[in-house]
Amino acid sequence: MNSEARMSAVFSALSDPTRRAILARLAAGEATVSELAEPFGLAQPTISKHLRILEKAGFIEQGRDAQRRPRSLVVGGPLKDVDAWLKPFREQWERRFDRLESFLHKKAKRDPKNPDGVPLVKCSIDLRVGGEFSFVNRGHGPPFAGVYRVIERPSLLVFDAMGAVGTVRLEGDRGVTSMTVTIRCANAEHLEQLVKLGIAEGTDRTLDNLVAHIAKTAA
């Protein structure tokens, strides 16, 4: 099988959500057919068919443990080939993320402002896992401060701030980048407090300003 045919078989095997879930389960350790079938409520012949496809593509292998026939992930294997295929795309996104990070950092140091254009009293960003950030508005409101918890370049940023968990997710499709921002509060009262502080409106204006700037610099 040539390399193109091999990659087609690999991506075909990954195209089914059940097979992807099986691989995710096996990433935690080996499992038998019955153990793999249990979460899906599928008959063993159906799961066995999925396993044969994964085995043929080289993702998994069958072992022998007394009377058991556990399946396990092949170390390296096709996942290494998929990672290599994705590498140039990942590097492109990382370069874009690095340029955006550099621009925002320089702009924050040079001319830190809130979404209304009012200069900030304080603006500090330590963009790394465990790093802290703080934005202090002049004359009103508590500081917006927190800690970065997850940074997966170029697509995911998770942070704690003001008792809430924020998630920023970037997704690219055909040259278009979409951004989804989620703020998860502890309860309804907490959400109401943040709304009263203007977090929603401030976030909207910040993202609108960011989109406008990117469109201007890209023109």
Image: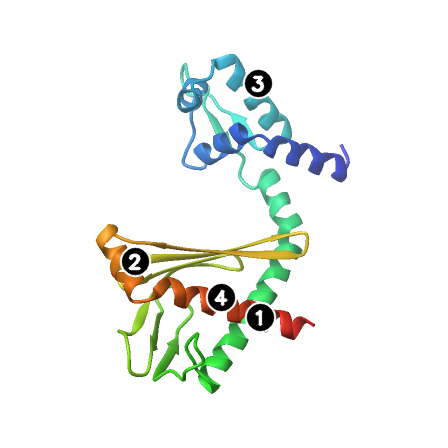
Which of discs 2 and 3 lies nearer the camera? The answer is: 2
Residue 73 in the image: above or below residue 80: above
Question: How busy is the neighbourhood of tag 2: few (under 14 within 10 Å), some, or many (20 plus)?
Answer: some
Q: Residue at x 64, y 44 (%)?
A: 81
Mark 2: secondary structure:
strand
Question: How busy is the neighbourhood of tag 1: few (under 14 within 10 Å), some, or many (20 plus)?
Answer: few
Mark 1: secondary structure:
helix
Residue 88: percent from left, percent from top: 66, 56
Q: Earlier in the sequence, mark 1 or mark 4?
A: 4
Residue 143: percent from left, percent from top: 29, 74
Kind of residue at badge 1: Ala
Residue 17: percent from left, percent from top: 53, 31
Disc 3 designates what residue?
49
Mark pair 1, 4: CA separation = 9 Å
Disc 2 designates what residue?
164
Kind of residue at badge 2: Ala
The numbered dot on residue 207 is 4
